[in-house]
């Protein structure tokens, strides 16, 4: 009894010392608003500052003798900060409120130094765990479980291992059987050519990091249709992220994906109103607001959804370019009718004058010069000949003035001379004055920012997939026409199109039919019986969607591969477990075969206490015990016989990575 009482006294003393340390720390941090929000210490911000040895934090800490004696060591007359010990103390939830709790559902705006709006006018988006990696709870419809974070600043070594390239297995090449046209066969993969299409099963964040070196700077268009964060339980991903989790989830993936884009590449992101505002600011930060092109409004439900006060009819597609010099293609308009015709063909008239007064005689003097128009003769279209040289009796025409400002022509004199009386003509207006016009002959046009035609209707996508697969197999797939329009304006035949939220495979299917190379990544199990099967049908020459419009009759090939499972197999089983007894069995297997994180001590695991947890909490606990760096087999473990990687898979994996 005396021993027990002594232990209790020791524990009380330790607890009191820690409380005193906490009190001192809180008092110090309250003096710097960077570390405080709503009166609460921002633990994550404090730890980040400590790990980068932020001078302002160090100066604060050494003001307290108690803190200095506890977290600093004197070495040859120099104070050395024990940041690992400090991190351990601050990370203890007993003494500091968890930063996720303190930040819960709280999104604010701060400048690049972390100062709040009241302290700065330079604004970027910030949110809880902005500097974290969210691997995500995406494999099953695990509705109650919070997402899994690994903080890039708290454990950079772990994050590096997490992002190491992964081993790929179950390689298959699907192509047309040349001996029996019309059939598609699967064959072994002996190499991955530079122009091969690629379908990968696995966590998209880790898959992106795995293919990054091979495809960096080669992708022309990335289109993604990520979870909309609607709380819709029917969505195959965990579509119940809070704002903070969702932003982190998207940020992690965009950061690595942008490295794959070519210098003239584009990124298009589909979203709805739930995260539109947050996503816009995030994308501005990641891609650069000067690279923003437009947010396309897609009227996907013309009838509207009658709830929320206003019937919503549309979604958005945000468009960004890698370079401000990148230019989108114009879309063809085969039904265009021209008002005028000549011996060359149809045309319309576009005034040569630049109506933008920002460009004027003061800053564009070379674009101000006269034309001379023959007033006596006009062709069947009522168009007059011109000259750049003075001819007596011909009318002199200058760019008109606007609000007293001398405007300019759009073309310089040399170009005008090259097109004179060929693509450049004059026409008399009702006021008797002559205007100079370009004969505009293109049947294409710049894509508009509102898409409201029936081809982009969501029901169309659902019907297309149901007709192709013979059943309702996916919720809200995009119509092929929506994706084809994006691919048409943002890429050319032969260029690479990527979608790392591949879903039912619409992007890959459309890219294939339009002659683009493609890379698609999907984590969900339906990839094998939906996504892959759809693409096999495309190779066979299925006639749904845009097939008739683009003249698609089949052909080509694609490679299928999977990130080699390690802890991911255990995570999948934990996710579908429906009772504690099943989780207990998995826990015992984890001890024997799983890769556990270095902080897990399964020997002290109390199964009685474990049984008292809710099913979701029990799942969370087991997953947290697994090492995140071993969700899949890392490339540097390729020769480890414990992973049972076949010689064939090992050989093609080495070829894929060029090792």
Image (cartoon, helix red, strand yellow):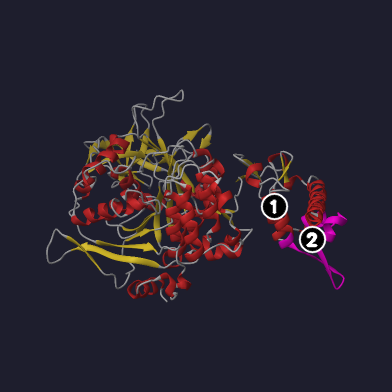
Report if residue 289 is visible in the image. no
> Farthest residue toward the front?
1
Q: Alpha-carbon neighbours of circle 1 within 10 Å: few (<14), some, or many (≥20)?
A: few
Q: Is residue 184 left or right of residue 434?
A: left
Whole-percent x, y for residue 110 in the image:
66, 44
Q: Residue at x 41, y 71 (%)?
A: 657
Q: Residue at x 71, y 56 (%)?
A: 49
Q: Quadrant of residue 390?
A: top left
Asked if the stretch drawn in magenta spans residue 195, the answer is no
Report if residue 367 is visible in the image. yes
Q: Secondary structure at mark 1?
A: loop
- Quarter of the image with the N terminus in it: bottom right
| Mark 1, residue position | 92
Q: Secondary structure at mark 2?
A: helix
Q: Is residue 317 left or right of residue 16?
A: left
User: Where 651 sits versus 53, above or below?
Assistant: below
Q: Nearer the viewer, residue 585 or 292?
A: 585
- Contact, CB < 8 Å: mark 2 with mark 1? no
Whole-percent x, y for residue 503 in the image:
35, 49
Mark 2, mark 1: which one is toward the viewer?
1
Give, as a single range, the part of the protein colored magenta.
57-85
Q: Which mark is residue 71?
A: 2
Whole-percent x, y for residue 236 in the image:
39, 44
Q: Nearer the viewer, residue 514 or 410?
A: 514
Q: Nearer the viewer, residue 286 or 566?
A: 566
Whole-percent x, y for residue 59 in the image:
82, 56
User: Where 273 sits versus 442, above or below?
Assistant: above
Q: Which mark is residue 373?
A: none
Q: Is residue 178 left or right of residue 6?
A: left
């Amino acid at each position: 009894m005396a021993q027990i009482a002594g232990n209790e006294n020791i524990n009380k003393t330790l607890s009191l010392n820690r409380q005193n340390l906490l009190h001192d720390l809180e008092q110090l941090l309250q003096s710097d608003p960077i570390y405080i929000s709503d009166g609460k210490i921002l633990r994550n911000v404090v730890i980040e500052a400590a790990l980068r040895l932020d001078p302002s934090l160090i100066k604060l800490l050494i003001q307290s003798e108690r803190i200095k004696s506890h977290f600093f060591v004197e070495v040859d007359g120099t104070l050395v900060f024990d940041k690992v010990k400090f991190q351990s103390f601050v990370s203890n939830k007993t003494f500091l409120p968890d930063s996720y709790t303190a930040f819960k559902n709280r999104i604010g705006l701060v400048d690049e130094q972390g100062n709040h709006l009241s302290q700065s006018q330079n604004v970027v988006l910030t949110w809880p765990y902005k500097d974290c990696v969210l691997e995500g709870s995406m494999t099953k419809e695990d509705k109650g479980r919070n997402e899994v974070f690994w903080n890039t600043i708290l454990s950079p070594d772990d994050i590096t291992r997490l992002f190491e390239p992964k081993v790929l297995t179950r390689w298959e090449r699907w192509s047309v059987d040349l001996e029996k046209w019309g059939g598609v066969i699967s064959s072994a993969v002996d190499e991955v050519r530079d122009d091969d299409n690629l379908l990968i099963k696995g966590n998209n964040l880790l898959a992106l990091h795995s293919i990054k070196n091979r495809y960096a700077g080669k992708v022309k268009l990335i289109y993604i249709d990520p979870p909309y964060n609607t709380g819709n339980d029917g969505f195959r991903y965990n579509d119940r992220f809070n704002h903070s989790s969702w932003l982190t989830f998207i940020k992690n993936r965009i950061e690595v994906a942008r490295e794959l884009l070519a210098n003239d590449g584009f990124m298009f992101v589909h979203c709805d109103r739930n995260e539109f505002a947050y996503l816009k600011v995030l994308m501005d930060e990641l891609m650069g607001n000067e690279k923003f092109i437009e947010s396309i409004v897609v009227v996907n439900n013309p009838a509207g959804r009658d709830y929320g006060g206003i019937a919503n009819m549309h979604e958005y597609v945000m468009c960004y370019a890698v370079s401000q010099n990148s230019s989108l293609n114009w879309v063809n308009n085969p039904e265009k009718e021209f008002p005028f015709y000549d011996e060359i063909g149809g045309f319309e008239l576009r005034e040569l004058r630049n109506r933008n007064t920002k460009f004027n005689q003061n800053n564009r003097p070379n674009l101000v010069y006269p034309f001379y128009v023959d007033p006596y003769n006009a062709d069947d279209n009522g168009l007059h000949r011109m000259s750049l040289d003075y001819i007596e009796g011909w009318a002199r025409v200058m760019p008109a003035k606007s609000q007293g400002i001398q405007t300019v022509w759009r073309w310089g004199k040399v170009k005008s001379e090259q097109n004179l009386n060929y693509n450049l003509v004059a026409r008399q207006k009702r006021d008797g004055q002559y205007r100079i016009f370009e004969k505009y002959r293109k049947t294409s046009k710049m894509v508009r920012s509102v898409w409201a035609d029936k081809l982009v209707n969501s029901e169309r996508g659902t019907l297309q997939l149901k007709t192709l697969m013979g059943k309702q197999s996916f919720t809200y797939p995009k119509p092929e026409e929506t994706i084809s329009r994006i691919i048409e304006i943002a890429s050319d035949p032969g260029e690479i199109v990527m979608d790392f939220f591949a879903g039912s495979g619409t992007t890959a299917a459309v890219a294939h039919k339009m002659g683009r190379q493609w890379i698609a990544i999907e984590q969900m199990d339906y990839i094998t019986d939906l996504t892959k099967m759809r693409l096999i049908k495309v190779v066979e020459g299925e006639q749904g969607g845009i097939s008739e419009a683009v003249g698609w009759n089949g052909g080509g090939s694609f490679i299928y591969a999977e990130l080699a499972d390690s802890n991911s197999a255990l995570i999948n089983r934990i996710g579908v477990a429906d009772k504690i007894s099943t989780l207990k069995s998995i826990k015992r297997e984890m001890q024997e075969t799983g890769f556990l994180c270095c902080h897990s001590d399964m020997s002290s695991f109390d199964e009685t206490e474990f049984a008292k947890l809710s099913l979701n909490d029990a799942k969370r606990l087991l997953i947290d015990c697994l090492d995140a760096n071993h969700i899949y087999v890392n490339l540097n473990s390729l020769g480890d016989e414990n992973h049972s990687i076949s010689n064939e898979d090992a050989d093609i994996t080495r070829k894929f990575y060029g090792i």
